[in-house]
Image (cartoon, rainbow, N blue to C red):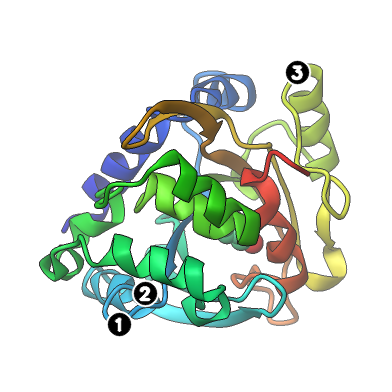
Amino acid sequence: MNVTLFFERLWQQYLAVTPSAEKIHQLLGGGQPIVNDHIAVRSFNLPGTGVEAFAQHLLAMGYRQGGTYHFAAKHLDAAHFEHSDPCVPKVFISELQVESLSPQAQQLVKNLASQVNPELYLRPEVFFSGRPWQLSYADYQCLLQESEYAAWLAAYGYRANHFTVSVNQLVGYQSLQHVNQALLDAGFVLNSVGGEIKGSPEVLLEQSSTLADHAEVSFSDCKQSIPSCFYEFALRYKQADGELYSGFVEASADKIFSSTDSRQ
Ligand code: OOG
Ligand code: NI
């Protein structure tokens, strides 16, 4: 699949539940195009449906694997992928260790997964295929008690859960503080878990993010408004060899995950 089309499809799907995104582009870009640093997708680690299943399509589109990451408390594993063309966004893919859930929640997740035709994962369109299973609101709430990640993924399925403005390529902003202030002045709410800025020049990456918008989700028994997707902002620093750091920082990513958690 052509990468431009791939990101256009992800972007349109994301916009449908993230009205803030358009306003943020207007605010920070003033009509000029915004370059995105990366997007992220979430998955379960069940056979054929986790990071590897998604990665195969990126490799076919000219990506190579970058770092791998572990989040013990959230029971997540992740990897990032970068493209040979530096203007093409990186992709961060995570997977939940389903075996870490309670037996009841594990059964619930397996029931969702069993509704999916495994061929879904063989096509690059899986990245923006949305929710391929039926879910009741009670089951959503049951998952939410154990893992906000599991609940979000069960409700929204496969999609970009955020896009990320590359602050390095943003005209008129010298720092992430400056970007955050513009967002706060315009009335956006930032994820404040661990401070509004995660990371530092020392770890070569500073990140911030909005709190997710809300969208109405059709559950099998009712419609409910729940947290949808967010926007992230990333400023990268040069490493010793003069190249911009292209990886992620576990301690910071751990807090970025909370951007879909309205209970923070
Ligand atoms: C991914 C969170 C991590 C980053 O830039 O560190 C991340 C997620 O919320 O699925 O995107
Ligand atoms: Ni991110």
Q: Look at 71% across and 31% down and name the residue there.
A: 172
| Alpha-carbon span between mark 1 and mark 3 | 43 Å
* Number of dots carrying numbers: 3
The amino acid marked with disc number 3 is Gly
Q: Look at 59% across and 70% down and name the residue there.
A: 246
**Figure check: 125 above or below 27:** below
Of the 4 image quadrants, the one containing the N terminus is: bottom left
CA neighbours of label 3 inside 10 A, class few (<14), some (14 to 19), many (20+) = few
- In the image, residue 53 lies at what x, y percent? 28, 75
| Alpha-carbon span between mark 1 and mark 2 | 7 Å
- Which image quadrant is residue 233 in? top right
Q: Which residue is mark 2?
A: 50
Q: Label 1's element?
A: loop
Left/right placement of residue 118 relative to residue 56 reads left
Q: Nearer the viewer, mark 1 or mark 3?
A: 1
* Disc sitting over residue 47 in the figure: 1
**Figure check: 109 above or below 239:** above
Q: Which residue is mark 3?
A: 187
- In the image, residue 162 lies at what x, y percent? 52, 46
Q: Look at 51% across and 52% down and name the residue there.
A: 151
In depth, the one of 180 and 102 nearer the eye is: 102
Look at the numbered discs 1 and 2 and tell me whether their residues touch, using CB distance below 8 Å.
Answer: yes
Left/right placement of residue 180 relative to residue 106 reads right
